[in-house]
Amino acid sequence: MKIIILIILIIGISVYLKKRKYDNSNYKKESGNEFKNVWRDKGNYGEYLTFNELEKISNFNTLCLRSTPGGNKIFHIRALY
């Protein structure tokens, strides 16, 4: 019984830390996507990871995700030279 409680506690803390990191990210501000949608959708999660990696590169300013009314997603990358 103690092991099950420990596993649930570890999973809960892990999700909490990931959500807190996501809430403080610029990706949330740029895309407007909610944490649960990003976490469940493999494509959105990949965009989130890509955004975080590109932010570490000083040559890149912004990576935005915008959806068109038809549901097609467009990636915009602005680079600073």
Image (spheres, rainbow, N blue to C red):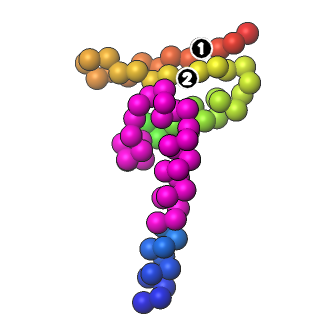
Compared to residue 28, the image places residue 70 above or below, namely above
Compared to residue 1, the image places residue 6 above or below, namely above
Residue 81 x %, y %: 73, 9
Residue shown at the point (56%, 38%) measured from the top left: 25
Residue 29 x %, y %: 48, 30
Instruction: Identify the mark nearer the N-term, 2 or 1.
Output: 2
Q: Is residue 40 magenta?
A: yes
| Outermost residue toward the left in this view | 70
SS label for mark 2: strand
Q: Is residue 69 left or right of residue 14?
A: left
Residue ID for mark 2: 63
Does residue 38 appear in this view? Answer: yes
Q: Is residue 17 magenta?
A: yes
Residue type marked 1: Arg
* Res. 78 mark: 1
Residue shown at the point (44%, 82%) measured from the top left: 4
In terms of secondary structure, what is the magenta stretch mainly? Answer: helix
Q: CA distance from mark 2 to mark 1?
A: 7 Å
Residue shown at the point (25%, 18%) measured from the top left: 70
Q: Is residue 47 left or right of residue 40?
A: right
Residue 17 x %, y %: 55, 56
Disc 2 vs disc 1: Cβ atoms closer than 8 Å? yes
Q: Quadrant of residue 35?
A: top left
Q: Which residues are magenta?
A: 12-41
SS label for mark 1: strand
